[in-house]
Image: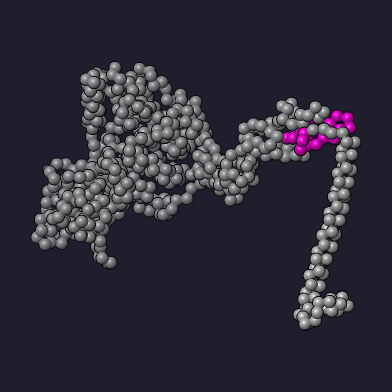
Amino acid sequence: MCAEARMRGIFCFLSWFLIMWGACWGKFVVEKNSLKVSSPEALKGVYECAIGNFGIPQYGGTMVGFVAYRKTNRKACKSFQEFDVSFKSKPGGFPTFILVDRGDCYFTTKAWNAQSVGAAAILVADDKVEPLITMDTPEEDNGRGDYLQNISIPSALISKTFGDSLKKALKDGEMVSVNFDWRESLPHPDDRVEFWTNGNNECGPKCDSQIDFVRSYKGAAQVLEKKGYAQFTPHYITWYCPEVFLLSKQCKSQCINHGRYCAPDPEQDFSKGYDGRDVVIQNIRQICLFKVANESGKPWLWWDYATDFSIRCPMKEKKYTKECAEDVMNALGVDLKKVNDCIGDPEADEENAILKAEQDAQIGKKSRGDVTILPTHVINNRQYRGKLDKSAVLKAICAGFQETTEPAVCLNEDIQTNECLENNGGCWKDKDTFRGRVCECPIVKGVHFVGDGYTHCKASGSGRCAINNGGCWKGTQGGKTFSACLEYEANGCKCPVGFKGDGITTCEDVDECKEKIACQCRDCKCKNTWGSYECGCRGDLLYMEEHDTCISKKASSEISWNFLWAILFGLEAAGVAGYAVYKYRIRKYMDSEIRAMMAQYMSLESHIEAPTTHTRLADIV
């Protein structure tokens, strides 16, 4: 336990050292914009403020509004709704910029609470006298990471001195009017765009945000690059392991090339999952893919690869492997040999030219500071600050063009692109069933296809057998056709009766005669057919299928005549019996009628003596 604790302590020190090394390697430049105060008279002037790395800065534009400062909830760490406060502008009124104090909670929490009650922007006043810093998103979401991507208002950090001046003016009852100005936040010298990222796809909300951005922004980036409006270059940050720790287990698991290029453990747990070296290898693989694609005149393929790899090869599903990466590259038509030659040997005790160039590029030059925040866009040698969002980044790129020189794509709200013209976009394809670069399985003639959309799609549900026979076996021979597709089942294949196999690729005829499944009586004669069999008898015998037996045709004839005579005799006996019953019922009916008539006459002549009565009755009868 002591040894383990000591090693963890050593690596904590290593991690701290790497971070400090990264921060001190060059210089960190805070990206700024202007804040102009137009009233009160005493505060008129232009002030610097640091653009926050969240929300949506209005690159290329301006925003005018009034400043508000609340004595309650001054740090905006609680919802303003608890204090029954609203900053929503009235129709025709100016927007409200809320001023809050730094401290006690994340910058993003302050921005979200301000946005939730209608603030148009947020100004955070520093709590000490110091150079301005860049407000960033938290590394951990603490269960609330879902709100980060919903922050849309711009944010800025102002100095403590400026903040105190604004508070004093508001306390004195002054109306403070300010103008946010982002028009010169980006210079206009050229069309270079860098995207600093990381191959890690299991680092919490930041990685999720990065992956979502790449997927949504890919189409716009490819249009800008294909038409020559911008030159995108992906970059990757790596660190090195200090020489004193080169032989440690941690350095060996997190680095390649003997500690020269390292990345933090993805799960921050050295005992499970993937290691930092896996991330570094994926980083260099993506750099080399871009290099090979760029040499072939198709640098935009990097966006396809980055998107598809994140979908098809996630760490969560244990697919973050070389094999999965190569499957994606094959689907996009990238030369694997060139990529692997570019990667080199991760075990070699020597510098890797590709990764060494990436480390050099991290260092700030001229007006651009060091790249220390991931992910980061560098537009015209200035680091983009704000929400990593397709429309926000595109607006920032378009703001980098001189007026009247921006491409038409910057003037359109929607960017249409057809990414499926080559290699079917790396997606699964079968006849006319492809449905787009999203790589989703299609619906064809009312039949749903299911699968990952990249390597396979299979018909499912009602009617699936009408399309490619539902992916099941089907055979025709001698004018007979058999299918293993189960028409009324959602999925599955099963060989029909008379066949055996997996039902997908093969169904072989069952030889019922050889396997003694049918036609097994002593005099039976069996003949196998494709998908069935024929059973007969030797000589002049007759086969009875229901009893699987053979009988003589003569005996069969005698049995038939005896059966016929039995039926005739039975019918005759039934007729005689019916006639007897009929006669009996008629006689019984007549007797009852005669008795009734006699009863009537006997009541009229009841005074006559018995003999006379008998004589008259006799006469009457």
Residue appearing at x 22%, y 44% in the figure:
106
Residue interval drawn in magenta? 525-548
Q: Is residue 102 visible?
A: yes
Task: Considering the whole magenta stretch, tell me its main secondary structure.
Answer: strand
Which residue is more in the foreground, 573 or 3? Answer: 573
Task: Name which quarter of the figure residue 244 lies in.
Answer: top left
Residue appearing at x 29%, y 17% in the figure:
247
Counting from the top left corner in percent of width and height, residue 129 is at 12, 43
Query: Would residue 234 appear left or right of 527 to someone viewing this image?
Result: left
Say if the magenta span includes residue 66: no
Counting from the top left corner in percent of width and height, residue 102 is at 17, 46
Task: Name which quarter of the figure residue 412 lies in.
Answer: bottom left
Residue appearing at x 45%, y 27% in the figure:
322
Query: Would residue 367 appear left or right of 300 to someone viewing this image?
Result: left
Which residue is more in the foreground, 212 or 300? Answer: 212
Residue appearing at x 82%, y 32% in the figure:
550
Say if the magenta span includes residue 536: yes
In the rendered image of this protein, does residue 355 appear above or below residue 167? above
In the rendered image of this protein, does residue 327 appear above or below residue 109? above
Counting from the top left corner in percent of width and height, residue 196 is at 34, 37
Q: Is residue 21 visible?
A: no
Task: Name which quarter of the figure residue 88 lies in.
Answer: bottom left
- The N terminus - image quarter: top left
Which residue is more in the foreground, 317 or 409? Answer: 317
Indicate how the structure is coloured in the image: one colour
In the rendered image of this protein, does residue 333 appear above or below residue 13? below
Which residue is more in the foreground, 510 or 92? Answer: 510
Query: Would residue 68 appear left or right of 142 to someone viewing this image?
Result: left
Counting from the top left corner in percent of width and height, residue 543 is at 82, 35
Query: Would residue 576 appear left or right of 75 to someone viewing this image?
Result: right
